[in-house]
Image (spheres, rainbow, N blue to C red):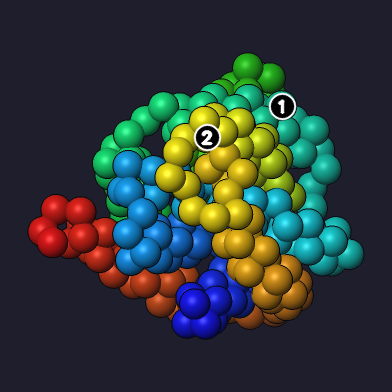
């Protein structure tokens, strides 16, 4: 039990720091670690990924608040983008979390592997952002589609959306610090509705771990959040001055190993 507590505390330190620094969303770290821990404790793979995703979203609710405060002070948050994208983000989160609740654990693992692999490749090889426009689209409908897709894909694998929203915002000519700060804020609007829906959708599931409310496990949320809320603040402050290219590549290697571990566990062992 002590080892498990330490694992989740360390997970919070790393995930919070990376979320604040790169805007990638700590969920990309929290989900696979929580999943492996639950399997180690002999919980059913049928719902282990559901618990990992819901608990990650719960952590992001806390972490994003800490990160948002820092980014607002640093003037990294674009409130015009927030007003434009939040409705679609929330809509995508609702649809994505409901979809996750009815999808089997096996399919969720496969979705996580595929999306995490694509995120890792993007982080490893994209040196400069691809610019497609000088600003966001003028069409409200196009913005709704873009933001809904970000919310949908993010909540489906339990992340705060930075892995999708940061590169998307940079494609629309937003500076990296502005993209990271705005993405961190959008993360709350992805995580909160997603966590709420997964709480209710898992209410009648039997055999869930202790301290679970629906699919959300309070023990995981509190342990990871207890450290991530502090390191997210540190990461956000450092994001202004640090060169992130090397760090992104190191993180991409971690993601690739995570995908490989999931493949081995899911298809070989």
Does 30 sit above or below residue 133? below
Tag of residue 204:
none
User: Dot 1: within a 10 Å radius of its alpha carbon, few (fewer than 14), some, or many (20 or more) residues?
Assistant: some
Say whether residue 42 is left or right of residue 264.
Answer: right
Say whether residue 66 is left or right of residue 153.
Answer: right
Does 243 sit above or below residue 182? below
Nearer the observer, disc 2 or disc 1? 2
Could you tell me residue 102's position as x and y percent?
Answer: 41, 27
What residue sits 17% from the left and 62% below the top?
A: 264
What residue sits 41% from the left and 77% below the top?
A: 250
Q: Residue furthest left?
A: 268
Of residue 263 and residue 46, the one placed in the foreground of this image is: 46
* Residue 195, visible in the rendered structure: yes
What residue sits 47% from the left and 82% below the top?
A: 3
Q: Which residue is mark 1?
A: 87
Q: What is the secondary structure assignment of the residue under circle 1?
A: helix
What residue sits 49% from the left and 53% below the top?
A: 209
Q: What is the secondary structure assignment of the residue under circle 2?
A: loop
Does 269 sit above or below residue 206? below
Q: Which comes sooner in the sequence, label 2 or label 1?
A: 1
Q: CA distance from mark 2 to mark 1?
A: 25 Å
Of residue 73 and residue 93, the one placed in the foreground of this image is: 93
Could you tell me residue 105's position as x and y percent?
Answer: 33, 41
Q: Which residue is mark 2?
A: 202
Could you tell me residue 159's position as x and y percent?
Answer: 53, 50
Could you tell me residue 153's position as x and y percent?
Answer: 47, 38
């Amino acid at each position: 039990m002590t080892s498990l507590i330490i694992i989740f505390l360390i997970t919070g330190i790393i995930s919070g720091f990376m979320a604040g620094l790169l805007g990638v969303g700590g969920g990309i770290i929290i989900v696979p670690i929580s999943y492996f821990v639950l399997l180690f404790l002999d919980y059913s793979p049928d719902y282990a990924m559901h618990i990992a995703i819901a608990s990650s979203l719960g952590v992001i609710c806390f972490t994003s608040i800490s990160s948002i405060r820092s980014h607002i002070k640093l003037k990294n948050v674009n409130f015009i983008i927030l007003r434009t994208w939040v409705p679609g983000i929330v809509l995508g989160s609702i649809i994505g979390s409901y979809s996750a609740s009815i999808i089997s654990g096996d399919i969720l693992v496969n979705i996580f592997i595929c999306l995490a692999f694509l995120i890792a490749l993007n982080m490893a090889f994209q040196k400069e952002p691809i610019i497609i426009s000088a600003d966001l689209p003028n069409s409200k409908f196009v913005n709704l589609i873009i933001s809904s897709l970000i919310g949908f894909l993010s909540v489906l694998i339990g992340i705060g959306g930075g892995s999708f929203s940061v590169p998307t915002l940079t494609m629309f000519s937003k500076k990296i610090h502005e993209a990271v700060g705005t993405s961190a804020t959008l993360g709350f609007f992805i995580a909160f509705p997603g966590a709420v829906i997964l709480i209710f959708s898992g209410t009648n599931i039997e055999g869930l771990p202790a301290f679970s409310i629906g699919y959300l496990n309070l023990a995981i949320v509190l342990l990871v959040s207890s450290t991530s809320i502090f390191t997210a603040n540190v990461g956000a402050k450092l994001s202004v001055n640090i060169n992130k290219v090397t760090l992104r590549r190191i993180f991409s290697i971690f993601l690739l190993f995570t995908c490989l571990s999931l493949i081995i566990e899911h298809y070989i062992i």
